[in-house]
Amino acid sequence: MRSPTGERIFANAEPIPEQADYRSVDYFAIYGISYMLARVGCCVSKRSSALGEPTREGTVLHSRSMRGSAHVVIETSEWSAVEHLHDRVVRADWLTLSLAVVYQIGARMRTIAVLVLCIGTMAAAGAAQTTISTVASVDGTPIAIECAGAGPSLLIVHGGTGDRTRWTPLFPLFASKFRVCAMDRRAHGGSGDTAPYSLQKEVEDVVAVVAAQPGPVFVLGHSFGAVCAFEAAFHTAKIAGLALYEPPVRVADHSVILARMEAMMRSGDREGALVTFMREIVLISPDEVAVMKGRPSWAGLLATVETSVRQDRALSQYQFNPARARTMTVPTLLMEGSKTASPEVKGSIDSLRETLPHATLHIFEGQEHNAMDAIPQEFAATVSSFLLDQRR
């Protein structure tokens, strides 16, 4: 068998007979412990397991959650018994199943099962269970949000492409300290869209979602989403703190590049358009783009590449006002990657740092525009520490 991260954790158990009784000591211990290990590995909720296809080693039992996916490999010799019991297992409350395992297995496996059960119980108790809802913006556009955890409210506003699912893998890192929510910006994910488009509507969306959250709200924004978050803080007194990761408040006119991107999309080369945007406008390095392509979020970025054109045009018309920025009373964490190459991003950070009265700068060493993907624990700890300090 293999653990949720793929490494082998047990040598092969004795083969289970074709007509194995699911109450047999070795079978129930092996299956029950494997099932619990999958639970512990990614803290999934009930009814989220699925049978995979047979492989050379066996059949994979998948478990999916906001943290990703986990699996255990059931050896081929054991699979007939597993298949016989699967429906009964995945429909059961996992704690009830685990207690059944402890009750029915033999003494030589009971200690192991109890230990795994204890770990699994703690992990399941701390897992971030999510809820999805919508909020109507000023123009009536429905804005989807997904929330988890308990505590002070933290709203995440994603960047120019993709949607909230790029951020939900970080929920477990925030949910023990915050009631964390990630919104889909208009025309992304589960949110709607209403013509004509404007940056002001994007700001109104953030304000509407903030207004729907309990108590004062912290807002974390990335890239284009950070500009929306920054502007929203001028329109509501509910924002208690900002964390802005590379907000492009000062950008040039990219019309020539955008026209080339549009031509690529018309010819069906969506990935070419997205790579052009990342390489020539955001100025992400080729190595970082290659890493991004290997991440699960790449598909979401591709799905919304068209929106990057209208958003960039809106940013080129946006006027950063230093005098207005000096009136900002909200404590603000400015974040930047040490390897970020864009002079526009660097200039934007400098302008904000020089004008915001309550700004703190944090630089992620060795990172570019995607520290939340590359170093999620460090990223979440940095944001959490700053925001929670504002409550003291």
Image: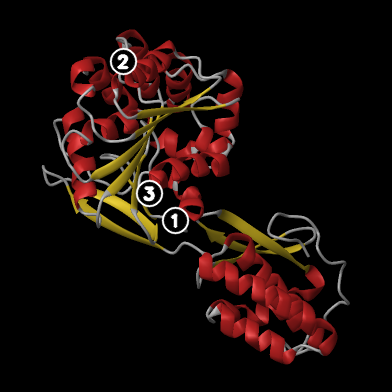
Q: Are marks 1 and 2 in contact (CB under 8 Å)?
A: no
Question: 156 and 241: which one is in front?
Answer: 241
Model colouring: secondary structure
Label 2: state its secondary structure: loop
Circle 3 is placed at which residue position?
392
Circle 1 is placed at which residue position?
177
Residue 124 location, quadrant: bottom right
Question: 178 and 115: which one is in front?
Answer: 178
Q: Earlier in the sequence, mark 3 or mark 1?
A: 1
Tell me, for residue 250, which label it has, or none: 2
Q: Give coordinates of residue 247: x percent, y percent.
A: 36, 25
Label 3: state its secondary structure: loop
Q: Residues within 10 Å of mark 1 (few under 14, many from 20)?
A: some
> Disc 1 marks which amino acid?
Lys
Specify whether residue 232 is in view: yes
Label 1: state its secondary structure: loop
